[in-house]
Every structure is written in structure tokens, then in C-alpha cells.
Image (cartoon, rainbow, N blue to C red):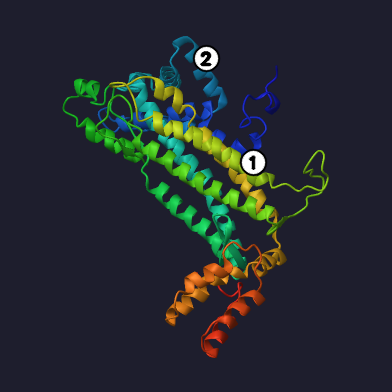
Amino acid sequence: MNRSPLTAITPIDGRYAGQTEALQAYFSEFALIRYRVRIEVEYFIMLCEWPLPPLKEAQKEQLHLLAQRTIYGFTTGDAERIKEIERETRHDVKAVEYFLKEVMEALGLGKYKEFIHFGLTSQDINNTAFPLMLRDALEEVFYPALTEIIQTLEGLAEQWADIPMLARTHGQPASPTRLGKEIRVFAERLKGQKELLQKIPHRAKFGGATGNLNAHYAAYPEENWQAFAKRFVERLGLERSFPTTQIEPYDHLAAQMHGLMRLAAIFTDLCRDFWTYISMDYFKQKVVAGEVGSSAMPHKVNPIDFENAEGNLGLMQAVAGHLAAKLPISRLQRDLTDSTVLRNLGLPLAYFAIALNSMRRGLNKIELNLPALQADLERNWMVLAEPIQTILRREGFDQPYEKLKAFTRGKKQFSGEDIHRFIESLDIPEELKKELKQLRPENYLGKD
């Protein structure tokens, strides 16, 4: 069977392939191989500073060409050669090593080829490649998309900053608010969690077979290899985890997954609120020619974008939650379960990318239905029981809360006339009655 999006097992590479394509550069099998090659080459380049003898200028130039080829010009043909070697070795990182040795021979640097993967274990490569992959994907794909959504929300918050809206607590009418402020709440929450996520360091393990650089010290006991390893990892723009076993502890990666899950939870909250506002007719959805809302009911315009986003956010949280729970746990100095799980590191970001695209579409389709908001306020004058009883407390009026409770509680409809009739029944000065009658649902908004 020919490979196509129609034959993909998961929607990520099938139905939604166009929405996740940007992540292929970071989380595909090709990307993993490319990052492994990069780590091996960067490590070899640093060894050329010491302990290897100085290279001649021509050799340095060839080395730079090697670095340029693997870091900037690595091809699918190169990756296919590595996969061919892997079929013989049955070891993916060793296949990268053998590939690079072939390249070294071709470049006339064969005498240095045994310093490819010198003293390392595969996890020195993997546990440096994966945090680089995640860092680059977050910075180059995820954060820009997240920022765009936040800016959209901030724009809507500003546009609707002065629109009064009935609030609902426990689903019941509550003190009025402003539509813009309610949207700004989401924007601020998202910005706060984005900032927290960005503060979590991307950490890498680089310490040999069991974390102690045993082989390095055996070969060159006079060198401070721990300092070397720290410099190498920091040169890549990462932090070095130390001390470690054979593998990275993944505590910081787990924290990053939890950070992404918190962002997903906020977006889920947002999707459900907008879905509810659409069902309440606060928002209309732009009708797109050719779209179908229901196969049976022609009139329907469903909030499918927010529903699609919510579903994919749930999948994102499920996978990220497993990564966060599983990766920090390893038997003794290492077992292989982390390797299996890490290959799915791109799934949370892929589901998130689909969700962000859906939310973007949903937000761009909504239109404010101001009459519906105004009508809802007009139906619910009982929300003024709060300010009236509070002002009466200020004036020393006896049991104002209890009197308002008896007058308003449980009534589904309550008009301005009802409120004014109650105010007139009170034994209070006329000036105070006048003050209370100035209150309306649309002007009882506080400040935000």
C-alpha cells in the first residue's frame, strides 16, 4: 500500500498532517537522527580543542565542512544510510557513529575517526538530542503559535472592554461583569503559564556509561572531564544534569510536560466557556459558504472548532501526563523504558498544534450578539440585591441581607419595576432611595 495521509494510523500524520508538518523538523525519525549526528559532530569538534593534537588549517577546513554538512545540510539520503547501517547493527546510535566514520574517511580525517563517540554511551547522545529537539520546537513553533493566540485574546478583550455581561457563578445569575475582562482573564493566565514554562531549564545528561565519565578518566586521567562535559552541554545552550546515572533524570522534562498540561487546562476552560456563550447566543458564528453543520438539520452552525480543540487538548494532556509520570522513574542505573517513551515526545506538541489551530479558527468566526447580552441583563435585575443590601448595611439598616433574600431568592424573572417597588417599601430617606434607584444591571460593574 502506498503511503499517504489517507493510510496513516493516527490523525496527526493523516487527517491533520498539514497542521503538524512544522513539527517534523524536530520530532520525526529523520529529525532524531539529525540531532544525534549534530551532537556527535559538536562533541568531536570540542575534542579537537583538547585532547586531540592541533589540526592543520586544511584539516580544520575539512572539519568545518563536515560540521556544515551534518548540522546544516543533513539529507534524507544520509538518514537512509544510517538506517541501512542500523539494520545490521540493531543499534540506532551506533549506526550514527559508523556513518560518521565513513564521512571522516571520505574527508581524509580517518585517523581521527575513533574519536567519534569517544568514551560515550548512547544516552549521552540521546539525552542531549531530545532536550535540544524540545527546546527548538518550543521556541520556533509552539511559543510563536501560543503568542498569536494570546494576542488574539488580548485584541478581543480590548475590543469588548466596555461590554456589560451578566456573570454566572454555579451557572446562576451573579454580579455583572465585562466581557472584555472575562477574556482578559484567560490571556493573563496563559501569559503567566508561558512565562513559568520558559523558566524551566532544558537539561541534558552527559557523563558516560553510568554518569561518572569512567572511560574518559581512564584514557586521559589528567583532564578535568567533568568540567569538559559541563562546557560542552552549555555550548549547546543547555544545562548539564549532574550527578546522574546512565540517563538524564528527566525531572525538568517532566516539569515542562506539566507546564504544557497547565496551558492545555486553561485552553480547555476557554473552549468550554466560549462553547457555552455560543449556546447562550452571546456569540454568533460566521456562516462559511459550503460548510455543513449537520447531515440532517440544515440550519445548524455548530461550535466544532472549540469542540475539536477540547478533544485534542485532552489527548495532549494524556500523553504529556504519561511522559511526566513515567520518565523520572528508572530501575537502578537505567532501564530501556525511557527510550520507548521518549520517541513520543512530539505527540503532546502535535496535539497542541492541532488544538491551537482549531481555537484560532473558532475565535476568528465568532461575532458579538450584543442584544442577547443586554436582554440577559434586563431579565435579571435580582443581581442588584447585592449592592442594595451592601449600601443599606453602610447606612445601618437592620437585616438588609435577610430582607433582600426573602424578596428575591429563587425567582427566575425580576424586573426593574420589581426592584423599585421594593426600594419604595423601605423606611429610608428619599435621597437614599434615589441613590439605590440609580443602580442598573448594566452599570453595576465594579472596576477591572
**Which residue is drawn at the image coordinates 60% and 39% (left, top)?**
311
**Which residue is drawn at the image coordinates 70% and 26% (left, top)?**
6
- Compared with 186, 38 (above or below) is above
Image coordinates of residue 403 in percent, x first then y, are 51, 72
Query: Between disc 2 and disc 1, whose residue precedes?
Result: 2
**Which residue is drawn at the image coordinates 45% and 12% (left, top)?**
90
Q: Amino acid at mark 2?
A: Glu
Q: Which quadrant does the N terminus fall into? A: top right
Report crowding for label 1: few under 14, some 14 to 19, many 20 or more residues within 10 A (C-alpha).
some
| Mark drawn on residue 308 | 1
Q: Residue furthest bottom?
A: 430
Q: Nearer the viewer, residue 302 or 366?
A: 302
- Asked whether, in this view, residue 397 is left or right of residue 124, the answer is right
| Mark drawn on residue 111 | none
Q: Residue 112 falls in which quadrant of the image?
A: top left
Instruction: Specify whether residue 334 is in view.
Output: yes
Image coordinates of residue 4 in percent, x first then y, are 69, 25
For marks 2 and 1, give the one nearer the viewer. 1
Cβ atoms under marks 2 and 1 closer than 8 Å = no
Instruction: Specify whether residue 67 is in view.
Output: no
Q: Nearer the viewer, residue 262 or 171?
A: 171
Q: Nearer the viewer, residue 95 or 201?
A: 201
Tag 2 residue: 84
**Image mark count:** 2
Q: Residue furthest left?
A: 222
- Compared with 1, 31 (above or below) is below
Image coordinates of residue 226 in percent, x first then y, are 23, 32
Q: Amino acid at mark 1?
A: Asn
- Compared with 204, 146 (above or below) is below
